[in-house]
Image (spheres, rainbow, N blue to C red):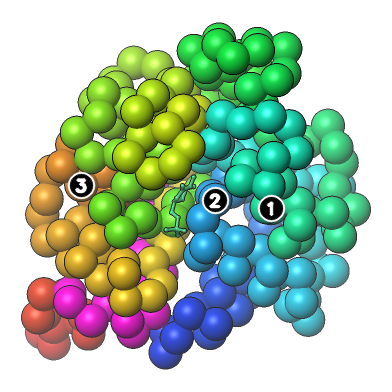
Amino acid sequence: MSAPQLVVHRDKELMAQAAAARLITRIVDAQAARGSASVVLTGGRNGNGLLAALGSAPARDAVDWSRLDLWWGDERFLPEGDPERNVTQAREALLDSVPLDPARVHAMPASDGPYGNDVEAAAAAYAAELAAAAGPEDHGPVPAFDVLMLGVGPDTHVASLFPELPAVRETERTVVGVRGAPKPPPTRVSLTLPAIRAAREVWLLAAGEDKAKAAAIALSGAGEVQAPAAGAYGRSRTLWLLDAAAASELPRGLYPPASA
Ligand SMILES: O=C1O[C@H](COP(=O)(O)O)[C@@H](O)[C@H](O)[C@H]1O
């Protein structure tokens, strides 16, 4: 487990631009070191803001888009092309405007796809796709993603792991179906905490006043069942990327870092 590091930007626009620049560097470095890179995308306002910023970043063409695997941390279980699906929003924000290899864009199944309305079957299929992509050098049935991004919800949810729901307690499966989510739509597919923790780097995105309480709770020692964001960490790095509004209720001493 890597202890959280915090970076606080002036506002959400700057946070999105800085995070996009950071992501470009991380992808380019991974491609230079291993030939390809793998990134897990998040839905929500902050995740889509980052993708839009990436689309207009001056260095965006430094990325070899054809050697990038994209996965999702969660998906709203809705028909293909529904405007509320995370993949639909990501396509609009960035993916449709860069030369990705379609075989490397691993969207989660839709509710009108091959598994129909069976969310557990859809989750199992995504788990199998992840397992097939994991190599011997990885630490289990999911690839060691280079960067896994998570938007933090105002209730501290990450991916579709909501406080106190069964999905956040999952310790075996890597992907689960979620029913009864308090944020619409109620039916979702989500990576679990064990799958999230297989990532090399986990970046939690929190911008806006409505994220201030969630950030303060998750970073103050809350348990992961009550505050799922507290249980999201990477193997080598856990990075909280915040704006000043989201950082406004952090406990004293947490940010700016206490001097020695
Ligand atoms: O529903 C979801 O919400 C969260 C956070 O969204 P935000 O708009 O409050 O930033 C997101 O992380 C998740 O992927 C998404 O499905």
**209 sits left or right of 258 in the view:** right
- Going from N to C along the chain, the mark reached first, 1 or 2, is 2
Q: Mark 1 points at which residue?
A: 90
Give the amino acid at mark 3: Ala
Residue 244 forms part of the magenta stretch: yes
Secondary structure found at label 2: loop
Between 73 and 25, the one lying in front of the other is: 73
Q: What stretch is highlighted in magenta?
A: 234-250
**Quick one: label 1, few (<14), some, or many (20+) residues within 10 Å?**
many
Label 2 near ligand 1 (CB < 8 Å): yes
Between 80 and 176, the one lying in front of the other is: 80
Residue 153 forms part of the magenta stretch: no
Whole-angstrom CA distance, mark 1 to mark 2, is: 8 Å
Quadrant of residue 132 within the rendered picture: top right
- Which residue shows up at 38% across the image and 44% down it? 183
- Which residue shows up at 35% across the image and 28% down it? 180
**Quick one: label 2, few (<14), some, or many (20+) residues within 10 Å?**
many
Label 3 near ligand 1 (CB < 8 Å): no
Q: Name the residue under label 3.
A: 227
Q: Measured from the top left, where is residue 250 in percent x and y?
A: 17, 74
Give the amino acid at mark 1: Ala
Let me know if residue 197 appears in the view: no
Q: In which quarter of the image is the C terminus?
A: bottom left
Q: Name the residue under label 2.
A: 43
Whole-angstrom CA distance, mark 3 to mark 2, is: 18 Å
Secondary structure found at label 3: loop
Give the amino acid at mark 2: Gly
Whole-angstrom CA distance, mark 1 to mark 3, is: 26 Å
Q: Is residue 260 above or below residue 216?
A: below
- Going from N to C along the chain, the mark reached first, 3 or 2, is 2
- Going from N to C along the chain, the mark reached first, 1 or 3, is 1
Q: In this view, does 235 lie above or below 16?
A: above
